[in-house]
Amino acid sequence: MKDEDLNKLLRLAIQKGELPLELDDAAVDNWLAQDMAGVPPEIPSKIERLVKVRLQEAALRESAASISEMIMPLGRLVSVIRTKAGLSRADLSERLGKTADYVAEIEDSRAVVPRVSTEEFIGLMQLLQLSFSRVSATVQRTIDSWAVGSSGWTDAISTGLRSNRDEALSFRKGSRSHTAAGDRKAAERWLSSLDSELAKRNLTDLRK
């Protein structure tokens, strides 16, 4: 079924009052459970799959837009956006075509930038609707925080930055064994590679 035909079918259901204007999983399940005489059996499952994807994308878009500036590893940012959107790691891994362990490795990493290639991370950016400027700003804030004392954290939070203070302080203390200058250069090289890959793919929307 083409998207055009799917949209016609959904519009007809809304016009008949069978579907509310604001769709959710329960509304879709209820509609698909009704008698769909004349509709090939494979169509309801395709409709359910496509509507689920659209609901997830809407939830991720709203989640990403609602999150304030944060100080945390990028993997943690991925986890926050996913959780707030109501998606499980299984949901995210399914959309990425990866395993749940792959997602867990990214989200649980304490590294400022994830230990995945920039090419793979772009898939996450597209799914989570994360712009390069958002990614870069999060990385820079997190690196800068390493040199900030506890009073600095208070100042940062009072100016509108958001963080889980205990987790962030623990992360900062654990990072002291690393060379801050070396980590900054490594992160900047990763960001430069990410920007180059976005340009190569002509993903102008993500390069904002």
Image (spheres, rainbow, N blue to C red):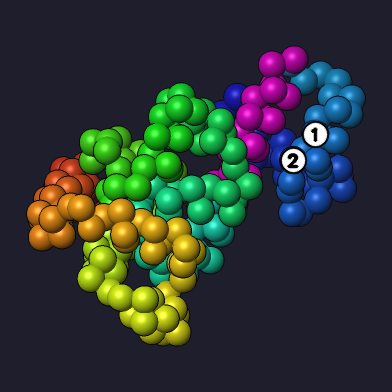
Q: Is residue 53 magenta?
A: yes
| Contact (Cβ within 8 Å) of mark 1 with mark 2 | yes
Identify which residue, 170 or 62, lies in the foreground. Answer: 170
User: Quick check: 201 left or right of 125?
Assistant: left
Give the residue at x 27% y 38%.
115
Quadrant (top left, top right, bottom left, bottom right) of the N terminus: top right
46 vs 182, nearest the viewer = 182
Figure disc tally: 2
Secondary structure of residue under mark 1: helix
Q: Residue at x 23, y 71 (%)?
A: 147
Magenta residues, start to end = 41-59
139 and 109: which one is in front? 109
> Residue 88, how many percent across, how many down?
59, 38
| Amino acid type indicated by mark 1 | Asp
Left or right of 184? Residue 167 is right
Residue 68 x %, y %: 47, 70
Mark 1 and mark 2: Cα distance apart in space: 6 Å
The answer to whether 62 is drawn above or below residue 24 in the figure is below
Residue under pointer 1: 29
Q: Residues within 10 Å of mark 1 (few under 14, many from 20)?
A: few
Q: Which mark is residue 25?
A: 2
The crowding category of the residue bearing disc 2, from other C-alpha atoms within 10 Å (few below 14, some 14 to 19, many at least 20), is: few
Quadrant for residue 12, please give it: top right
Image quadrant holding the C terminus, namely bottom left
